Image (cartoon, rainbow, N blue to C red):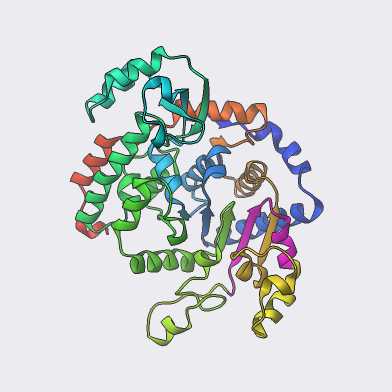
Amino acid sequence: MAKNLFGLSQLDHFRSTLDERSLKSLNDAVRRIIDVKKNGGHVMVVTGSGPNIHEGVTTLIAELIRVGIVDAVSTSSAVIAHEMAGSLDRVYRVDARALGMDMSKMPRGDVFEFTCMNESEIEALKREMPLDDELLSRGESLPHQNEIIKAAGNMAYPMGLRTERLAHEVLGLARMYGLPFERVAGWGCDEHTMLGAAAKRNVPVLVTIPQLVGGGAVGMSIGDSIPVSERSMRISRMLASCDVIIESAVALTQEIHDGPFECYTGHGIWAWWSGQSTYNLREKSLVRIDLDENLRRAVELNETVQEAIDKGLPKTKAAKIPFRMEMSAFARHEHSMPIVGDIGKVWPLLAHDVAEELNVELDFLSASQDTPEGSEMREWIVENVKPLDRNRMLERVANFAVNEQ
């Protein structure tokens, strides 16, 4: 496999953007991950949506799954939708009014987007779903306002519509076999997506309950594929099996890592009381990558936060900082490592340093999109990370054995 180490030449620059405390947290996280992996432990990543796609982080996580560094992933339904469409794609925009669209249904900006596709790609798609040739022709004939790279399978015709329709088919298959939507979709996804890489290595990827809203029909189909209680238990088992949890530009992580089955900072006491399976965050390490300085401030005020909880007082007023929900458990946990920085710069450092120490050879390394190497990386993703292969997914479905569940 050709190496695409886009961020390699920028590592020194990326490191220089971190202040002393974040650099220490990064180094602490690297050492902890190395120690865990050398001792047969596991690492889980919890990703947010858009920035993780645009910065190439999800593509990098796919590579870390491939080499055995990442062992579990939870993410958002929007990320699943984008990965089903190839992560990033190129679109062009035209005037929606000139195109003859119903303007009351158009998004802000009054534009309509088309996916940039060649003739062979369009013909292949026609074998899967009907396309409006007249609409494609009108769009091509109108002045193109601009051409941009976006998160794939979103608002552009026809790939956005294709993802919507494919979601319903994947949902039907998931229900038929009693599987999460994410697993079935992964069977057809590109190996450079988290879904595709995870499917090859039998690594779990699940959307968390707070992140089910997004991705249009994909989000609804993910939510409908298995019950909420089953999704909660599956995610709790993923978290229980991992020693390090890396949270990457994601909101509401309190509701993810200390939910209904977690007994240290969560609400698991009554699940335990009732004889259900529970787990404990006590000895786990939480690494959080975020641009918000308040994340680190909350950790520094951990005694204040805990004291407020003990007295039944509002945490926001006690800490005197804007308090997002995910800070509650993160702020109070003894093994929290806040890295205040750009995920596009932090992730290449984290991946490179861990892989180097473990003597693991990476074939892909992301780069922040505000660098020339990052722009090159985004072009590479557009050209090389392909949308879900429906035929490959159906072939895998046809050979699925019930005992694989």
Residue occupying image coordinates x 30% and y 57%: 224
Residue 27 against residue 185 in the figure, above or below: below
Q: Which quarter of the rendered picture does the C terminus lie within?
A: bottom left
* Residue occupying the far front of the picture: 104
Residue occupying image coordinates x 69% and y 80%: 308
Residue 332, quarter of the rendered image: bottom right
Residue 282, quarter of the rendered image: bottom right
* Residue occupying the far right of the picture: 20
Residue 257 against residue 361 in the figure, above or below: below
Q: Is residue 93 left or right of residue 121?
A: right
- Read off the magenta span: 282-299
Is residue 353 magenta-colored?
A: no
User: x%, y% of residue 19?
Assistant: 79, 50
User: x%, y% of residue 106?
Assistant: 42, 34
The answer to whether one can see residue 302 in this image is no
Q: Nearer the viewer, residue 396 or 294?
A: 294
The answer to whether one can see residue 107 in this image is yes
